[in-house]
Image (cartoon, rainbow, N blue to C red):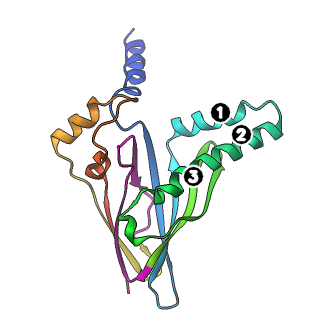
Amino acid sequence: MRRYCFILLLLSLQTLGHPHVWIDVEIRPVQDAQGRIAALRQSWQFDPFYSTLLLEEVEQGATSEQRQALWQDLEKDIRATLGDEGLYTFPHRQFAAPRDLRLVQKGNDLFVEAELPLLEPSKHLQYQIYEPEYYVEILHAKAQPLQIDGCRLTITPAEPSEEKYIEAAALDKNQKGDPNLGRFFAETAEWTCR
């Protein structure tokens, strides 16, 4: 009986409170000939539940052609959403439109991979990655390298107030709250290159 109640509790948590999707992102700076950061190569790994949900949608195709068409539709939707939003990387004014955005399956995991060019290459870059309404939580992956090719990454965790936690927890899956709620839960990342 206890196990049954625990499972019901877990299932109910899926519909209450934001966020509802979790993403681990790994960032690699792309440097120009002067060693400045010219772009950020991003790899987003969706949480297992959301990956399974999307993959099951694709697997509904009866034939390999139908599954391929469903995959292409999913990739097109993701490309449109994330492309229009600049991969949710802020401040937008630092970046050009994402390029080479694609959906990748590795085993049971789904990834979005893309490159986000800087408008002006720089040896120093500070940014945040967040979905504004906090429906999706995006954090740097635990495996994120902190030093790559002469560049060092510093990640400062978010410190949202208790009020922001309560606000996020009060929103169910179909509710919208503060359109900038996500920024209160976003890490601040800073790359510095020699």
Q: Which of the two discs, 3 and 2, labels the residue nearer the N terminus?
A: 2
Split into 4 quadrants, where in the image is the C terminus? bottom left
**SS category of the residue bearing label 2:** helix
Q: Which mark is residue 1?
A: none
Kindly indicate the quadrant of the structure image that contains residue 176. top left
Residue 25 vertical placement versus 37 (above, below): above
Q: Residues within 10 Å of mark 3 (few under 14, many from 20)?
A: few
Q: Which mark is residue 80?
A: 3
Residue 10 is left or right of residue 44, and the answer is left
Q: Is residue 42 left or right of residue 104?
A: left
Question: How many badges with numbers are in the image?
Answer: 3
Look at the image and say whether residue 131 sits in the magenta stretch: yes
Q: Is residue 95 left or right of residue 79?
A: left
The residue located at (50%, 56%) in the rendering is 84
Q: Give percent across and percent down for residue 72.
A: 70, 47
Q: Is residue 54 above or below residue 186?
A: above
Q: Which of the two residues, 53 or 134, is positioned nearer the viewer here?
A: 134
Hey, which quadrant is residue 128 in on the image?
bottom left
Q: Which residues are magenta?
A: 120-146
Specify which label sits upstream in the sequence, 2 or 1.
1
Above or below — where is 4 with respect to 98?
Answer: above
Q: Is residue 119 above or below residue 174?
A: below
Residue of label 1 = 57
Name the residue type under label 3: Ala
Q: Write the residue at 57% across / 49% down.
A: 78
Report the residue at 60% width, 46% height from top. 77
Amino acid type shown at disc 1: Glu
| Quarter of the image that includes the N terminus | top left
Quarter of the figure with residue 165: top left
Query: Residue 117: image x %, image y %?
Result: 50, 72
Disc nearest the viewer among 3 and 2: 3
Can you give x and y, in whole percent of width and height, for residue 136 in the image? 41, 43
